[in-house]
């Protein structure tokens, strides 16, 4: 029976689903104003900003979105190939490549979001929430003297982010399951040369017996 | 094995470098456009179509349209007044005017009246709506006016100005001074503020001159 790494196959399929979802639904959104004045949508595959309903995406951001999409896609396909044949000589390299990509994506995304919030706090004095609603005050340099202004914002992690966490868990599980998947295939290997020689010895003596 | 490693390295490089390189190549004649969206670039160049509605009439180069006076009413028995203005939303975005609050003070600090928005108003992009601001004057205001019967205008200081538009709350902690002329219709002793009774309806403009 051909050996497969079922967890790697599941991780690959889940990654493909994650890619499809992330193109349309962001991992984290920041809504500014009530009613909505502007929205910042963050995901490795679709980072964009909209103001007054008009989406604004600089070309560099667009390129990075495409790059992330291709990277995740390649990782999922590589995991798919590995999962189907985990016992090949090159399988460990495929696994090493494939399972790390969602890991890097999630890690970089978290660093990006936390970094953005920290940067806004330190550089602009604006305290964005990571989740939930808040009324943030405009920094003093943005308002004339004597005028204070505040604007409501709402931030939330969307469901593709939690799907990405699940994909990450599956990838790590596939990596841990690799040894078991490969170990199972060792038992199906042909008998060792010493056993083969014993058999040949029996055959040789019987043939010598015949010749003699 | 080495071939697999090389292929994986090429995949990594290709998925990262090619899209970014393509974007750089496309924007090679104008590299700042790599990070500046066309809409923001348009704003920098003076094209305010992202923010300003096309069908706002009477717009200046910035699109701003001054509110125009429509009417005013005075109820001397209730000591209330209301002023209605026509406000044009010159933005490409609907505005919900939720609150306007201010306190008018005399030069000596006497509180003359409190001003507030009568009811929340929604003004669609490029459209105009009537906005009514109401107020209730105090006895001190009547006394102040009666003590200055010959004054042709009144110096009023607005303080604690709070404006709530689309839940964006702007609070002006500084005072804003303005001059209000004593028009015959509003400040007639027999028929207006400081008078003995009745209510008046004004149609003339209020002359405001901000400091």
Image (cartoon, helix red, strand yellow):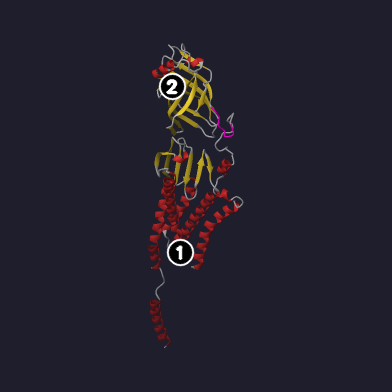
Figure quadrant of the N terminus of chain A: bottom left
Q: Are marks 1 and 2 on the same chain?
A: no
- Residue lying farthest right? B29
Horizontal relation, residue B170 to residue B42: left or right: left
Residue assigned mark 2 = B135
Residue assigned mark 1 = A93
Q: Nearer the viewer, mark 1 or mark 2?
A: 2
Figure quadrant of the C terminus of chain A: bottom left
Q: Residue at x 50, y 59 (%)?
A: B12
Number of other residues with Cα within 10 Å of mark 2, as a class: few under 14, some 14 to 19, many 20 or more: many
The correct choice, above or below, for A131 with respect to B151 in the image is below
Question: Which label is found at residue B161?
Answer: none
SS type, badge 2? strand
SS type, badge 1? helix
Q: Tag 1, which chain? A: A
Rendered location of residue B77, percent (x, y): 41, 14
Residue at mark 1 to residue at mark 2: CA–CA distance? 77 Å
The correct choice, above or below, for B48 with respect to B5 in the image is above
Q: Report the label total.
A: 2
Segment colored magenta: B60-66
């Amino acid at each position: 029976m051909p050996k497969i790494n079922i967890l790697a196959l599941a991780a690959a399929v889940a990654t493909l689903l994650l890619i499809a979802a992330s193109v349309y639904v962001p991992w984290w959104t920041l809504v500014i104003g009530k009613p909505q004045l502007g929205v910042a949508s963050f995901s490795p595959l679709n980072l964009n900003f909209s103001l007054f309903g008009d989406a604004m995406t600089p070309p560099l951001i667009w390129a990075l979105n495409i790059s992330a999409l291709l990277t995740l896609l390649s990782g999922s396909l590589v995991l798919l190939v590995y999962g189907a044949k985990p016992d090949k000589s090159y399988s460990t390299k495929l696994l090493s490549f494939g399972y790390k990509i969602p890991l890097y994506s999630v890690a970089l995304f978290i660093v990006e979001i936390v970094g953005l919030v920290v940067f806004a706090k330190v550089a602009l004095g604006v305290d964005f929430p990571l989740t939930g609603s808040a009324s943030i005050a405009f920094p003093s340099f943005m308002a004339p003297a004597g005028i204070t202004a505040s604007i409501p914002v709402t931030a939330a992690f969307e469901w593709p982010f939690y799907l990405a966490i699940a994909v990450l868990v599956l990838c790590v599980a596939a990596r841990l399951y690799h040894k078991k998947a490969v170990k199972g295939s060792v038992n199906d290997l042909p008998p060792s040369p010493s056993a083969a020689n014993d058999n040949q010895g029996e055959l040789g003596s019987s043939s010598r017996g015949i010749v003699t | 094995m080495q071939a697999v490693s090389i292929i994986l390295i090429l995949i990594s490089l290709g998925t990262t470098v090619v899209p970014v390189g393509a974007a750089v190549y496309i924007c090679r004649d104008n590299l700042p456009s790599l990070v500046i969206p066309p809409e923001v670039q348009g704003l920098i160049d003076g094209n305010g179509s992202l923010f300003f509605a096309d069908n706002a009439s009477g717009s200046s180069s910035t699109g701003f349209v001054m509110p125009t006076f429509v009417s005013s009413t005075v109820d001397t028995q209730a000591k209330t007044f209301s002023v209605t203005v026509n406000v044009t939303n010159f933005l490409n975005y609907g505005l919900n005017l939720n609150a306007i609050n201010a306190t008018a003070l005399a030069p000596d600090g006497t509180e003359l009246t409190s001003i507030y928005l009568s009811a929340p108003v929604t003004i669609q992009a490029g459209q105009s709506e009537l906005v009514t601001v109401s107020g209730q004057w105090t006895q001190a205001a009547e006394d102040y006016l009666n003590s200055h019967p010959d004054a042709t205008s009144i110096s009023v200081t607005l303080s604690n100005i709070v404006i709530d538009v689309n839940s964006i709350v702007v609070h002006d902690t500084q005072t804003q001074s303005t001059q209000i002329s004593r028009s015959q219709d509003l400040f007639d002793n027999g028929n207006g503020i400081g008078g003995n009774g009745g209510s008046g309806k004004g149609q003339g403009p209020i002359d405001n001159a901000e400091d």
